[in-house]
Image (cartoon, grey):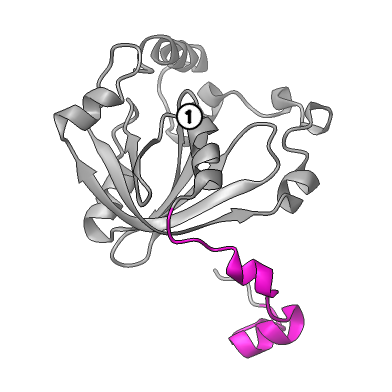
Amino acid sequence: MTIQFADEITTEDQLRAILGTPTGRAVDKVVTTLDRHCRAVIERSPFLLIASADSEGNMDVSPKGDPPGFVRILDDSTLAIPDRKGNRRADTFTNILQNPKIGLYFLVPGFKESLRVTGTARIVRDIELRESMAERGSVPELAIVVDVVDAFFHCAKCIIRSGLWESAQWADPTSIASFGQILADQTNAREPVSEVEEQLRESYARNLY
């Protein structure tokens, strides 16, 4: 059941009456090609989030992580992202086949600003490209090539508020159930939690690449 509220914003006029309009700098900071500042972040980023949607607008956000520079800059308007071993859900890939529009969010640990990139995506298997993105001797089976539409830097306020890079502000991870327990509960696993956790340890040790 959808929770009902008495005071919802339903038009942009209502929204702007509260928030106002963006400053000229906030609008003007958008670039349509990857300049040296965008390149500097992408080349140093070990982690990004990919937002995609299917033909009906159902959204997905998937994380990607690898050694810094794993996202290849092919030219000022083109990026390539290797696909590593995973659970074979392929949510991003199936979305791209239905709707090529994509959003990328790059983070560099310790750097408080972040980089947002939007564009259109293709799934490619060119061997030269895939071999250039090999890691630990493992060549990815697929790559996502993104044709950049625009990019801009996101200010540091959300990172500062969250204390994301400040270890003293981090929550105690032991207060959250183990991933093995979570999977056992959510999948109604028949095997004991200890066995699920051992399977995870094995996967992390042997199936990263």
**Closest to the observer: 16 or 45?**
45
Which residue is denoted by mark 1 in the rendering?
Answer: 183
Res 62 quadrant in image: top left
**Residue drawn at 70 percent across, 32 percent down:** 110
Number of numbered markers: 1
Residue 27 shown in magenta: yes
Residue 39 shown in magenta: no
6 in relation to 31, above or below:
below
**Residue drawn at 41 percent across, 10 percent down:** 202
Where residue 168 appears, as percent x and y from the top left, is 84, 28
Residue 187 can be seen, yes or no: yes
Crowd tier of the residue under label 1, counting other residues whose Cα lies within 10 Å: few below 14, some 14–19, many 20 or above: some
> Does residue 122 appear left or right of residue 31 in this picture?
left
**Closest to the observer: 107 or 97?**
107
> Does residue 4 appear left or right of residue 19 in this picture?
left
140 in relation to 200, above or below:
below
129 in relation to 149, above or below:
above
**Residue drawn at 64 percent across, 90 percent down:** 13
> Does residue 143 appear left or right of residue 152 in this picture?
left
Q: Quadrant of the C terminus?
A: top left
Where residue 10 appears, as percent x and y from the top left, is 60, 85
